[in-house]
Structures are given as structure tokens and as C-alpha cells.
Amino acid sequence: MISGLYQGQDGDARLELRIDVDGARPTGRVSGDLFSVAGATTSYSGSFVVTSPAVRAESDETRVDGRGTFTFDTPAKDVSVTLTGTTGTATVAGRTYRLAFASPYFRSVLLEQDTVAGAVPFVAYDTGTLPGPTGLTARELSVIGAFREAGVDLTAAPPGVIPVEGSGADLAWDDAELHHAMTQQFSLLSDAPAWRVWLLVASKHVAGYRGIMFDYNDAHQRQGSAVFYDAIRGDTPQAQRAQLRTYVHELGHAFNLLHSWQKNLGTPPQPLGPSGGFGDLSWMNYVQNYQPGGEPAYWAAFPFQFTDAELIHLRHGFYRDVAMGASAFGTGAAEVAPFEQPVEDHSGLRLELRAKDGFGFGEPVVVELKLSTTGEPRATHGHLHPDTEFTQVCITQPSGRTVLYRPMMRHCVDTSPSIRLDSGNPAMYRSAYIGHGRDGHYFRQPGEYQVRAQYVAADGSRIVSPACLVRVRYPVGGDDHRVAELMLGEEQGRLFSLLGSDSPALRAGNAALDELIDRYAGHPLTVYARMVKGLNAEREFKSLTADKRLRIRPPDPKQGIEQLTEVSRDASIDNITLNMVMRRLARAEARQGDLDRANAVMDRMVATFAAKGINPIVMGQIRRQADLTKAALSAEA
């Protein structure tokens, strides 16, 4: 048995060498990371991998040789390792290192886990409790155990408990609050890549998600995740099994593992597994979408392990592609070819993108997605918004470059309620802000953009929309230029993505929006600043302090009403966003103590959409939505 991690030194050069040719699930590879040492500092130099090494045992000596693939140019591509017991030498890129065995694990990662008071962190699940695949080895499996079985030594720092200051608080988290918690946590870390990951065990997400991966668009890539206890709570074997899978799934994203059906969107792209990736028996698949057979078939066959390809990535992926804080999720900016229509499409579904005729320079670009049936009734899932990643959006910029829209936060939806599209419900709609994501602003210059979307249906069909033309107008006067500058800041983009935030990390962005409102109150784009400020004021806001206490800022309904009333009267806001704004305005009125005004806002919402000539089926849905909002606000009051 020679597999494991070896460490070597040659003068000012250091080598971490991974040999993986025997032992548990060997991948038949040798890989390593190279570092340079200068004084008291160590810097990363590059990585390599040998995919098919030759292994020869000669008396008490073992030789491992092969040709490597390097992240840097070197004329010496042959890699040679000689081992005697736990020591030896390795020749890599022309240098020879003295080796010593360091660990049976290929990589080591520190897990820091904090739990909000009231949530109960997962401990372990006995894989033999419920029926599983024939030959499955029953064992008590924890999150740490799942990664150690993959060859990664995940070790836990002492867990923390986050107390909640105040009583009667709504402990549902939204993306802006999670973003703030992330920036507070990551402010304690350096900007350098590190084998360290943070997991927040929170109560619940406002949208009911089970988990989320923080993939922030700065130096802190893939350094944290959150799981939501209320969505997976329970002591039953089924609940414990689901908790194990959710924890491992979210942490898998931090190691730069994509969802099973998205591996073709990575850089470089990887081949999809069976059924377009939905047939993968992996922690990174969604159990309800497993094909064939859905959730029952998944659990009947799942061996509680990563796939072979995922194992290769975890053990032998290049340093920057795996280490937290290094390459972005999917490895760098995802430049892609424009989505193409399938050669044959018998799905019975049609996907369309719509945008208004033109956007001002700096205006947040919002598109409407519509999924409809082409004839016969069809059942699929309702995850049409690109933030849930069953829908991808690509943007061809005026330069001809096509990039993938990548949301700031990755929502994992482990439940997919079936939606039936038929004559009574012929289409579903979502509104998506795609102007900003993890790569920054996508519409930074005037001109014409071609936007396409791809929806992955419940049966794995990939439905591609026709191209949607998005025109960004040139600024006309000095005010247009200054307003665009105030709108296109990086922090402002994050505020539009999060619909506002109290985070001090976004202080400059909030100041820019305040300047818009104060100095350019009559400019058409100022309505978006009002919307962000009003939506943020209308809600409470949770803050995770430096000493890890949870503080909650109460809603400011007066400020919310002042800003959102202006927004609700603006004709430039798209219908789906306007619907959301008016419902939040009604909630602010109710929280201010005026239920009659809240009901009047809902009546005005119905009248506004009726005057637009909305089709009768959608109009019926809006009326029901207004009635439900009235009932909920009345009950809350």
C-alpha cells in the first residue's frame, strides 16, 4: 500500500505529492502541487497530474512513472517517483524532491460550523437503517466520514452556537442576510486560498430552500455554505438520511463540484453522466430528479459516495480548481457557446424570453421567462428562475463574446413539486434580474445583446429559447452619464441582486443609491434605487456580529411606504416585479397599522393589471394572490 499524501522539499521548492494507485477506490493517478518558499512565506507555483502511471515493485522498492499534464510550461514532463517504505524521491519538472509519507488522505480541510440557536446540527446516519443497494456496507456515516471515504481529511473545529438577541423574531433568512453573514465571517479570513470552509446551520430560508453555497464574486470563492434546519429537520431515518445528503451536497459545491446535470457548463466542460447527468448516483444529484425512477430508485441504488469522476476532482483536481478561496465555481468566468436548439424536440414544452424594447445605460436588465405547452398537457417542475440552476441564461455581448449568467448565490432545491401545464394553466412565468452576477455587470456598454435560456425539464429534456434581443441605449446627456456611473458600481450590482442590504460591506453602494434619490429624483432610473431601498427598509434585517451573535433590525414600514409607493406608480417596472413590490407595499401599510390602506393597495394592484389587458387566466391568478395577501395580513394584524 503506497497510496496517500507525500511531502517533499528541494531547496526553496516544496512538493505535495498524491499517489493513488491502490487502497480504497484507486483512481490510477499521481498528482501534485508545487510551492516556492521565500523566507517565512510560501507561494503556489503550479500543479500537475499523471493519468496512467506505470507502477513497478522491485524487491523493497516501488517505482511510479508517467507523463504529466502541467498547469505551467515545462520541457520536462516526465514524472518519476521511487519509494522505499515511507520515504523516497520524486522527480518533477526537472527537480528532485526528497519525500516523506504525510497522510493516508490526499487532502486536508478544516470545517468550521456555526449553528443558530434553535437549530439542531446533523451528527450521523446509519446507512443500514433503510433499504439500499445490494452489497452496501452498513456504517455510521457522518459528514466528515463521507469526505474521508473520498480521501479528503475533513476535520471539524470546535462548533459554535449563535445566540439570538431579542424575542419573537422571524428567523427565516433571505439572501441579503446570508450575504451579510458571509461577509462578516469571511472578513476574518485572508484573501489567499486556504483549505478551510465555513458551514452555517440556520433555521430556514424565506424561499424554503434546503441549502445554499456562497459563491461570492471577490477573492473569497467557495468558502462557505448554509443548510436550513427547518427544511430537513426530524429524527426519522428518512430525515437523517436527507440531512446527511444535504450537508455533503452543499460542502461538495465548496470543493467546486457542480450539480450532476451541469458538468458540461464547467471550464473545461466535463461529459454528462447517464440521462443528461440525472442518472448519476452522486451526492451532487437531486434525488427527486434521478432517472429512471425518481427518489425511490435513487435511494435504492445510492452507495453513499461520490462518482468516480468527482473522486478524481476531489483528489487530483489542480490546486486552484479545488482549494477554497481560489478559482470561481465552475473554474473561472464561464465563457460558453450560445445555446443551440436541439435537433429534435418532442418535449411538448416551449421556452420564451421577453424584454422591454430598450434599457437605459446602467438600467438593471430584467427578463421575463415563459414556459408553456405546445399542445398536449405536460407535467414538469416549477424551477424556472435561473437562481435555482435548472434554467441557465447565456448572454452574447456586442463584442461577440458569449458568457453564462451566474447568480451570486446558488440555491439548492431538493424538492421539485410537479407543475401541470394545460388549457387551464397554459404557462408559467418568472422575472429574473440578469444584469449582475458573480462575474460582475453583464451589460456594461451600450449596444445590442442576444440573450438565450435553457430549461432542464423534469424528464431531462433541455428546452432552448429563441434569442431575445436586449438593447442598451447610449446615454444622451450629462445626467445620463452620471446616473449610469452610480448604477454600475460593483456594490450597487450586488444590492440589486439582493434587493437591498444593511451590510457594511455594501456601504458605498447604498451611498450611491442615496445620491441617486437625492440628486436625480426625476431621472427614470432612480425608480430602481427607490425599489431597493424601499424593499430593504420594509423587512427586518439579521446581522451576524463579529462575536457571532445574531441581531435583528426591525422593519421600517414608514420608509418602505415612502419609497415603494413611488415605485408602484412607475410604468417602467416589469409586471412580475411590480406585483412583488405592491404586495410588499401592502405589508408595510399593514405593519404601520393601517389594514384598510393595505387592502386598498391590493385592490389597486388588481385594477392596474386589469387595465394592462393581462390574459384572463393570469388575471385570475393575480386576483387570488391579492385575496391571499389580504387574508395573511389580516391574520398577522
Image: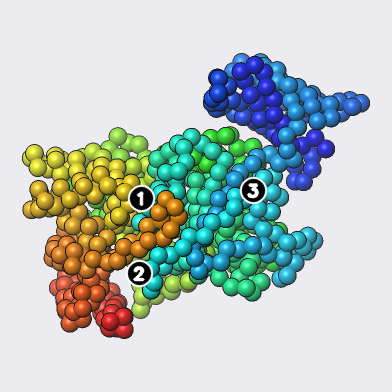
Q: On the rendered structure, is 19 left or right of 249?
A: right
- Dividing the picture into quadrants, the one containing residue 146 is bottom right
Q: What residue type is labelled 2?
A: Ala
Position of 459 relative to 453 (above/below): below
Amino acid type at image mark 3: Thr
Kindly report the distance in space between the C-alpha atoms of the residues bearing marks 3 and 1.
Answer: 43 Å
- Looking at the picture, how far across and down is residue 251, in whole percent? 56, 52
**Residue at which label 1 appears:** 452
On the image, the x and y values in percent for residue 39 come to 55, 20
Please name the amino acid that badge 1 sits on.
Answer: Arg
Q: Nearer the viewer, mark 3 or mark 2?
A: 3
Pointer 2 residue? 427
Q: Position of residue 92 (x, y in %)?
A: 67, 21
The quarter of the picture where residue 83 lies is: top right
Can the viewer see residue 412 in this picture?
no
Q: Mark 3 points at which residue?
A: 155
Q: How is the image coloured?
A: rainbow
